[in-house]
Amino acid sequence: MNKIEISENILYVGVNDRDIDLFEGQYVVPEGVSYNSYLIMDEKIALMDTVDARKSEEWLANIKVILGTRQPDYLVVSHMEPDHAGSIAAATETFPDMQLVGNAKTFAFMGQFFDMDIENRKKVVSEGDELSLGSHNLKFVMAPMVHWPEVMMSYESSEKILFSADGFGKFGALDADEDWACEARRYYFNIVGKYGAQVQTVLKKLSEVEVNAICPLHGPVLKENLDYYLGLYDTWSSYRPEDEGVLVAYASIYGNTAGAAKEIADMLKEKGVKKVAVTDLARDDMAEAIEDAFRYDKMVLACSTYDGGIFPCMEDFLSHLKGKNYQKRTVALIENGTWAPMAGKKMREVLEGMKEVKVLENVVTIRSAVKEETIAALNALADEIVNS
Ligand code: FEO
């Protein structure tokens, strides 16, 4: 079992999953992921969320190590997505006296996922309701669309601990030795990014309480420097760029467009841009490209024309950006086309449908391969990006 120190009476019983190939069926997680679950020990015992069904047995064994033959009195269900709710049926069967705590939507979704007779075991709560466990007291904070409609957080007021559901979570098992922000940012923008307004609403509610520790459903328990994490969430959810920098994202068929993208990336660095990230949209992790697009204030898109339009991996990238509410950024375009270059026009049309995205007028058009005049045009575009 992971040894995670929270407090004398709040204990970690979650699990790591290092065997999963794709999280949520689409995200690569080279360092796995953790499904967090906690026990609050008091006169009454609350179990905070379950884990993915892939790990039910390990999770139930973790609980048994602490409780022996005792049962939790309550299972608090923060979120019905199967990475957390997948073991609800197993838990309900294992602990027949345990009550289930959730809101009206939680139980509607529970009925859709499971066939269980829990009518007499339901405790339905709503915004601001409290559940006393003895000296510990849980107050429920609804967090709709962070990241599903039924999501709720729980604030334990005696120890000032926030159980934050998916909020403040990250990819990576708990024994992964990696930077928090990198994998938390990739997680945030790809999973919760669309719902910045809803995250802002929750942050406002949380600003009214003192928080000593944040216990998310993925990744480490956060106990120090909480202003740093709260500050990043405020930046991310308000769609403010986190850093000055440029993401250069390219979609290239034979390498000529890629060459132009790398050329302008070098030019930007030479002109003093400290952070320049380059991504090959056909080969690199799309989720990382999305993360970098939101991280920086500027972006260059370099794309081959294909079937009279945008090369498919760039089209996919733009569709992801639109879906995640990409906004408040400056974008420069490079297109390539041997006979009828159209990618620039088509990319502009998509970008102009996004909120407060400024697309630079000047577009570099490559007619097949990078030539001397292309270098001059790229240099002029790099100047414009730096000065924009
Ligand atoms: Fe970690 Fe939205 O589930």
Image (spheres, grey):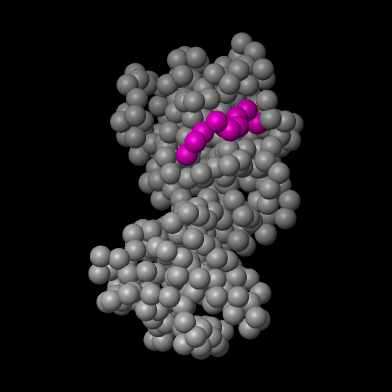
Residue 359 image position (x, y, % from top left): 40, 80
Per the image, is 257 magenta? no
Q: Is residue 68 above or below residue 323?
A: above
The N terminus lies in quadrant? top right
At 46% from the left edge and 78% from the top edge, which residue is drawn? 370
* Viewer-closest of 374 and 35: 374
Between 336 and 37, the one lying in front of the other is 336
Residue at 60% x, 61% y is 232
In the rendered image of this protein, does residue 6 appear above or below residue 372? above
- Tally of numbered discs: 0
Q: Which residues are magenta?
A: 12-22
Q: Is residue 266 visible?
A: yes
Residue 245 can be seen, yes or no: no
Asked if residue 174 lies left or right of residue 152, the reply is right
Q: Position of residue 121 (x, y in %)?
A: 41, 22
Task: State which quadrant residue 18 falls in.
Answer: top right
Left or right: 212 as drawn, with respect to 185: right
Q: Position of residue 147 (x, y in %)?
A: 44, 48
Give whichever of 155, 194 is nearer the camera.
Answer: 194
193 sits to left or right of 37: left
Residue nearest the observer in this picture, 153 or 4: 4
